[in-house]
Amino acid sequence: MRTKPSGVLAAEQSQPVASTTPEVETIKRKSDGLRGSIAQELSDGESSVSTSSAQLLKFHGIYAQDDRDMRRERTSQGLGPDHSFMVRVAIPGGRLSSAQWLALDATARELADGTVRLTTRQAVQFHVVPKLNLRAVASRLDENLMTSFGACGDVVRNVAACHSLSAHPIYGKLADELARRFKPSTAAYWQIFVDGTAVAGSANERDELYGDAYLPRKFKVSLAAPAENCVDVLAQDVGFVPVDDAGTLCVVAGGGLGRSYAHPDTFARLADVLGLCDASEAGDVLEAIVTAYRDLGSRADRRRARLKYLVADVGPDAFRELVEQRLGRTFVPPPLPLEMHEADDHLGWCERSDGFWQFGIRVSAGRVRDGEVALASALRELASRADLGFYVTARQDLVVDGIEAGDRGSVSRVLADAGVADADTLGGVERTALACPALPTCSLALTEAERVLPTIVGDVEDALATRGMAGRRLQLRVTGCPNGCARPAVAEVGLVGRTKTTYDVLLGGSPRGDRLARVVAERVTAAEVPTVLGPWFDRWREEGLDKESFGDFVNRVRE
Ligand code: SRM
Ligand code: SF4
């Protein structure tokens, strides 16, 4: 019997869902190392691909999409969907060089819709890429030592890591090392997209880790910094949290936030602590977990196939034992309960210990473009001037790093001239708000997210201001459906798409990412959100403790 543990956020109603059939399992097994007929279909003159190629393309970081804004009009004209592709570039730890940033920027302008979309797991997406441009995108990435391979699909995806770890002598390289070790071993991506020659796999190409069926589902790994949980490590399949400076990591497993209204036995869940490991054995620990999941995870129903369900079904202690058997040793529990800390948002100027500076830029919903603010041009200018570091954060923001003290003035001027707001002037909600892409690109979106974020943020900030609470910080996250791509289920305020025009309102997550929010109102329009939040804000103002965050307050007073 499946038991639903406490501390989970269950799904409630019905919703259109992605494929739940095990058909994908057959497609994977018969794919000849993720090749299928992708190569032939790339040049067949059609604007889209077959269903099986669409499934396999995900492993190559590519999603078949269509412009959902245009569906109705095109149908009335007797036309089919306006097909295009989303390409997700895996960037371990979100770390990029100036040259790589320039390559991403040029690729977006020349081969996609002109925007670079920073994701909640430190990757970068291109949207509206025509099928005929896919090979050119892959070649550009390859020339600049980047890849979309393994950014999606049933494998270990982009390994996220808090930017604060990047300069650490032990933890700084871990995201890269894990990313390399857990990439599938097939040469398919190179052959199909970059080299463009061979299309058949070789007999000795066997993938020892993933086999021919890969994992039952996607698999996400994150590294949090000891004192700041900007990656929401407890929402990941596996997380590593440094507990000291000498290489000791606390391993957590079994987190995940996606739910489906159509499947009431799906739920959001926070990861459990497995125990301690040394950074040098993080790869072996991860392999033990990944192979346990590969062999024991459900392959019958993709909606209930993530690692969190395996951990919940067998129980955290039994799961730990399964991993220990594969690892050949038992885990030592951490000396103290794992404590998460509020994330630094990495915005504004910050001096590094080596005398260089970094500047964190707020990017609304992670969308880098030239609009009211000429952000794309400003970043291009900075990247062209010097060899800097560009870090995508798990909050969809960008940190420009390695700035010499003497260059601070000119960097500030470039950003100010482009209209980039100073971090100190950002609103308390605006500063950390997140939204998933939703419409028009996401095929699973029930309603809007990214496009309505500025309006919702403005309305919530107004609701605070009218109560004399202007500037109070509050973490707001909006998604177009309960898959939870902007992690609303751990937010202080989560708005989760419920119908075409409404959201469920979730409250009470924590700024530390260590507690699930709960539904307080259902089917609320965006315009009604301030009305729902208003009474809570009144109580927060009257009854809130000194410096008590909104999420902690709601959690303390709710029944
Ligand atoms: Fe996500 C599917 C976008 C982070 C849970 N996610 C999708 C797809 C690919 C839609 C699809 O399957 O057709 C979305 C593409 C939309 C588009 O037009 O670009 C999409 N997810 C995103 C991104 C870009 C949101 C963002 O605003 O940045 C994030 C990319 C992360 C990355 O770089 O790898 C993104 N997705 C997340 C997160 C947050 C996280 O991982 O920290 C979650 C919740 C955590 C989790 O995995 O449980 C998340 N995405 C999902 C799910 C639900 C999975 C589940 O097992 O429950 C789906 C649907 C699915 O897989 O079937 C999904
Ligand atoms: Fe799409 Fe947003 Fe739902 Fe993710 S949460 S699947 S991006 S609508």
Image (tube, rainbow, N blue to C red):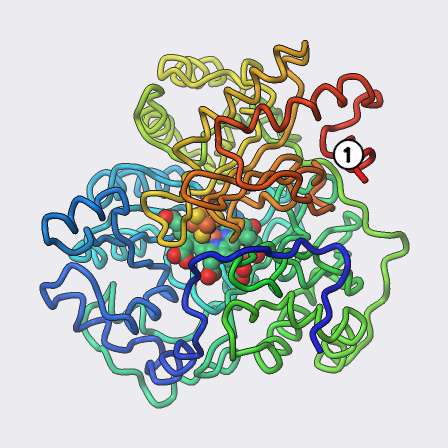
Horizontal relation, residue 261 to residue 256: left or right: left
Residue at 70 percent of width and 36 percent of height: 511
Residue 91 visible in the picture:
no
Q: How crowded is mark 1: few (under 14 residues within 10 Å), some or many (20 or more)?
A: many
Residue at 36 percent of width and 20 percent of height: 373
Q: Is residue 161 above or below residue 328?
A: above
Q: Name the residue under label 1.
A: 552
Q: Can you give x and y, in whole percent of width and height, for residue 138 in the image?
A: 28, 57
Q: Can you give x and y, in whole percent of width and height, for residue 499 in the image?
A: 45, 45
In the rendered view of the protein, which quadrant contains the C terminus?
Answer: top right
Residue at 31 percent of width and 56 percent of height: 142
SS at mark 1 in the image: helix
In the foreground, 141 or 43: 43
In the rendered view of the protein, which quadrant contains the N terminus?
Answer: bottom right
Residue 197 visible in the picture:
yes
In the foreground, 501 or 338: 501
Q: Is residue 487 above or below residue 348?
A: below
Horizontal relation, residue 359 to residue 141: left or right: right
Residue at 47 percent of width and 17 percent of height: 421
Q: Can you give x and y, in whole percent of width and height, for residue 193 in the image?
A: 25, 64
Q: Can you give x and y, in whole percent of width and height, for residue 450 in the image?
A: 42, 36
Identity, as a three-letter code, of the amino acid under mark 1: Asp
In the foreground, 369 or 209: 369
Horizontal relation, residue 214 to residue 110: left or right: right
Horizontal relation, residue 299 to residue 150: left or right: right
